[in-house]
Amino acid sequence: DGGITQSPKYLFRKEGQNVTLSCEQNLNHDAMYWYRQDPGQGLRLIYYSQIVNDFQKGDIAEGYSVSREKKESFPLTVTSAQKNPTAFYLCASSIWTGRGNIQYFGAGTRLSVL
Amino acid sequence: AQSVTQPDIHITVSEGASLELRCNYSYGATPYLFWYVQSPGQGLQLLLKYFSGDTLVQGIKGFEAEFKRSQSSFNLRKPSVHWSDAAEYFCAVGAGGFKTIFGAGTRLFVKA
């Protein structure tokens, strides 16, 4: 089945530690996204990538980094510079239909700080 | 700037009652509009979308939404709510190119 796989489902970070969240898609979509979700704040865009080897900062990129070496993969690293990383992280991919851009989501990773 | 407003943080309806979730958007051109649903601890699932044409769009799970350009609204409706519809609902607008702007969400509670 085609879809978006995020791993792990739960992740714990120690102080000063970098952690990487995985996102893989087999939908053959060109664009991929990372969102952060906090209670009552909806989804906030961290980074997005329209093609391989290219990505752009979203609204809250500070303390995060990404790479896009393969079309299928868009990992997100939460660095030690992100002082409040506890949140639910959602990865998405999208395809341009010629009439609009439709995003599809993974099941999410919940990150907590120890 | 593009924005999406969902005025209701949470709504409670009785099972079997009708439902309407409100959404207002701000966008300079013809909008692409979406409704997504999220169950606790899960990702977002697309319920329906509006790109052009008929202003009343049908989606999955018996949901529909009506685009009203004069009111800048895209309200989600369901004639009879089931307990399994309890979830958080997000309205979104295509912000040009590959970006999408999401509202803050409305949490739906269903009482027996």
Image (cartoon, helix red, strand yellow):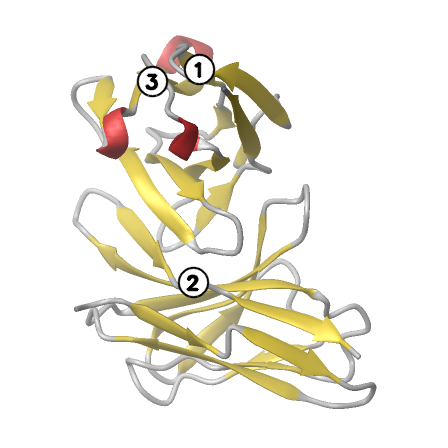
Instruction: Report the side of A77 relative to A39 (left or right).
Output: left
- Give the residue drawn at x 29%, y 50%: A102
> Label for residue B78?
3
Q: Which residue is mark 2?
A: A107
Give SS at disc 1: strand
- Look at the picture and state if A113 lies above or below B39: below
Instruction: Report the side of A61 relative to B77 (left or right).
Output: right
Residue A104, image x, y percentages: 33, 56
Say which amino acid is labelled 2: Ala
> Residue placed farthest to the front in the image?
B112
Say which amino acid is labelled 3: Lys
Q: In the rendered structure, the residue with mark 2 lies on which chain? A: A
Question: Circle 1: is it few (<14), some (14-19), or many (20+) Cα within 10 Å?
Answer: some
Q: Which residue is mark 1?
A: B20
Marks 3 and 1, Cα distance to the nearest angstrom? Answer: 7 Å
**The C terminus of chain A appears in which quarter of the rendering?**
bottom right
- Give the residue drawn at x 23%, y 17%: B56
Say which amino acid is labelled 1: Glu
Give SS at disc 3: strand
Res A86 seen here: yes
Between B112 and B102, the residue placed more toward the observer is B112
Res B94 seen here: no
Residue B68, image x, y percentages: 36, 13
Marks 2 and 3, Cα distance to the nearest angstrom? Answer: 25 Å
Residues at marks 2 and 1, common chain? no
Between B78 and B22, the residue placed more toward the observer is B78
